[in-house]
Image (cartoon, helix red, strand yellow):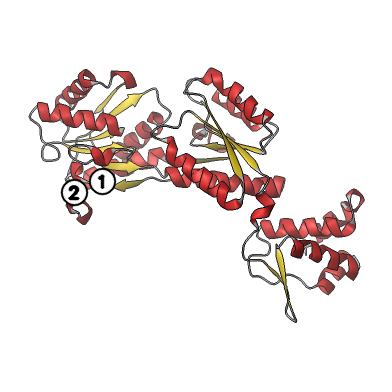
Amino acid sequence: MSGKRRVAVRDAESRGLKFEVLADQLRRGILAGTWTAGQKMPTEQELSKETGLSLTTVRRAFDELVAERIVVRRQGAGSFVAHARPREQNARRRIGVLLPDTQLYYPRVLQGIDEALSTAGASLQLATYRYRPEREDEAISALLDAGVDGLLLAPTLTGVDSPFARAQDLMSLPVPVVLVERSLEDLGPADTTEHVCSDHSGGAFDAVAHLNRLGHTRIALLTRSRTVTEPGVVQGYRRAVESLRLPSGLEFSQGKHEWAADGAASAFRAVRELEATAALVFGDREATLLEGAARRGGVAVPDDLALVSYDDEVADLAEVPLTAVAPPKYRIGKMAADIMLRRLVEGDECPLHQIRLRPRIVIRRSCGANTPAENS
């Protein structure tokens, strides 16, 4: 045990019984990874010498950890960190979850959250705001009034006056907050939010690079504007175009509600006018509509036009199954829940997590790649 840990034990003695203080210090050390699962703990004699506490006090601290099943004693061998943290320590934890909705993108995120919390013995309470920012604070207040221990939030941070101020307000709530698929990426090191996000920029970059490897140089980007995901997709596309030295200016964007039959026709006309042989389309619905417009225009997918969709929710259901960029939605939810539970246990000793997971590309027929996956 380090000198700092020894001082912490002594300074804390006035706030509780000595064995309880020591047990708490050991517990936090285990959760922080100072001693890992299966590792032998310091002996009672060693801890007594390092902390200046009596053997009786040290033994009582170990008794606490053994009763909690965090530590196990082995006759003649010593005390060891248990191989699994008990579900009981999270049995009363309830985590509030705020999502825009539970359709399309978010069911897999919610599944990851639910399974991580259930595995740990915790529970969740869900609220949605139906993409109406004015309802967010009301929903968050309702979750707090219900007594949740922490919040996993997917709030509105685009199209607001000050995303930074909004994020700061959320991070100052009276319980720990982890943002899900939200961050202040443009702020770089100034972003102090705790978050788990998809790397949409990286996913778009990989899609363009994939199409370029297939021989395409005139690669268009067709997007649905005014969405949370679009800025990252556009950024990744432009970085790929610049890095690969491809023709630029092959972009077309229109609002979600404009992507109906007429909108798909407009997008198809844009592809033809841009003389693109391939396109990255955000998202699956829009790519499927574009497929139909291309077919009606006498253009075959993928022979005349290769497509990659961004999302992979219903990409496999298109007439020509769509190659798609697949954000790791389940993993995003699971990791966010795991981080929340760790923060609730470790408090300020828990490092700030800022995690960005890169999507993968699922190869199907629409891009024309000759792979075993396409032919299956």
Residue type at mark 1 is His
Q: Position of residue 140 (x, y in %)?
A: 61, 27
Query: Which residue occupies the foreground of this view, 118 or 376?
Result: 118
Q: Nearer the viewer, mark 1 or mark 2?
A: 2
Q: Position of residue 21 (x, y in %)?
A: 84, 55
Q: CA distance from mark 1 to mark 2?
A: 9 Å
> Looking at the image, do the residues carrying marks 1 and 2 touch, with CB atoms under 8 Å apart?
yes
Residue type at mark 2 is Ala
Image position of 349 (left or right of 130): right
Image position of 265 (left or right of 198): left
Number of the label disc, if any, that sits on residue 210: 1
Q: Residues within 10 Å of mark 1 (few under 14, many from 20)?
A: some
User: Can residue 161 be seen in the rendering of this structure?
Assistant: no
**Which image quadrant is residue 215 in?**
top left
Q: Residues within 10 Å of mark 2 (few under 14, many from 20)?
A: some
Residue furthest left as drawn: 298
Q: Position of residue 128 (x, y in %)?
A: 52, 27
Q: Position of residue 249 (x, y in %)?
A: 26, 27
Q: At x 48% / y 40%, what residue is drawn?
A: 110
**Which image quadrant is residue 104 in?**
top left
- Helix, strand or loop for disc 2: loop
**Which image quadrant is residue 204 in?**
top left
Q: At x 78% / y 55%, what residue is drawn?
A: 24
Q: Which residue is mark 2?
A: 369
Q: Is residue 118 above or below residue 266?
A: below
